[in-house]
Amino acid sequence: MELVTDERCGFSLVHRQERFFVGPDPDRGAWSFLEEAEDGRGRKRPPQAVSRIVRQMGGIQVIRSDAAKRYDGPIKRAERTWIAASPHALFIVDRIEAERPVKAESVFMLHNGDNGMQVKVAAEHKLVLRRGGAGMKFFQVYASSEQRLAESGQAIRYASEQFQPSHTIVYAAALDDTDAVRSWHIVPLGERHFYVEPPAKTGGYSLELADREALIVHDREAGKSYRIDGEDRYPFA
């Protein structure tokens, strides 16, 4: 499993030679925002530009990007961090900050132009994706505001139900072949600590949300931990 760029689509998540999420960069269509208007209905803000950085830490690939410049209005921060812990674990952390309360809709574009993607909704925030010989369990594991799921053919959408000035949303995924992925589990080790558990129930990786917006990735096989500080932005230290 890896996060790759190419001339054809710019960015994609590839596992077992199959693409799951696609886009010209990690944040194409990542969000839309609804700003609360005087009539209470809200109004959407159009996208503009994005910045991106990449970091390699051992067997972990990190892509962090800020898409705040894509949106006019109150959006001060629209940051997404992808953490690919090869070959089986993926974590995604979204952090949104606005000058005024907004609702955020997170969008993941599926590689499904040929209708080759199978999507199973196991629970409200738990999806199982299969394409070719590749399988993925994709869970939303943490949200600072309540979210609802809507799946629409080419995209998976998580929409917040409350107007808030800040949102933090975390996703975790396990990747394997279409049969073996059943035996992977994504389990909480605490309110802010999430484990992509292998079938053997040992090893693998977990992600901990630490203080000051730090992210700690625990390699539970090697007994090592990697810290991504909240201040590690543009560029990483």
Image (cartoon, grey):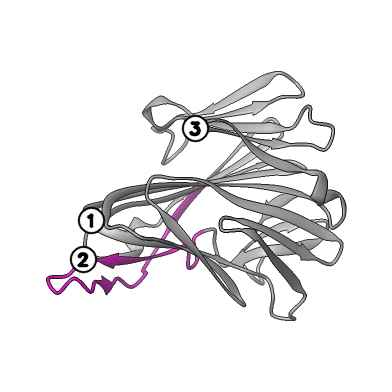
Horizontal and vertical percent position of residue 208: 54, 30
Of the image marks 1 and 3, the number of the one nearer the N terminus: 1
As helix, strand or loop, the secondary structure at mark 2 comes to loop
Relative to residue 201, is residue 129 depicted above or below?
below
Asked whether residue 81 is drawn in magenta, I would say no
Q: CA distance from mark 1 to mark 2?
A: 7 Å
Counting other residues with Cα less than 10 Å from the Cα at mark 1, is it few (<14), some (14-19), or many (20 or more)?
Answer: some
As helix, strand or loop, the secondary structure at mark 1 comes to strand
Of the image marks 1 and 2, the number of the one nearer the N terminus: 2
Q: Amino acid at mark 3?
A: Arg
Q: Is residue 191 left or right of residue 203?
A: left
Circle 2 residue: 36
Relative to residue 41, is residue 193 depicted above or below?
above
Horizontal and vertical percent position of residue 211: 40, 25
Q: Which residues are magenta?
A: 27-53
Circle 1 residue: 101
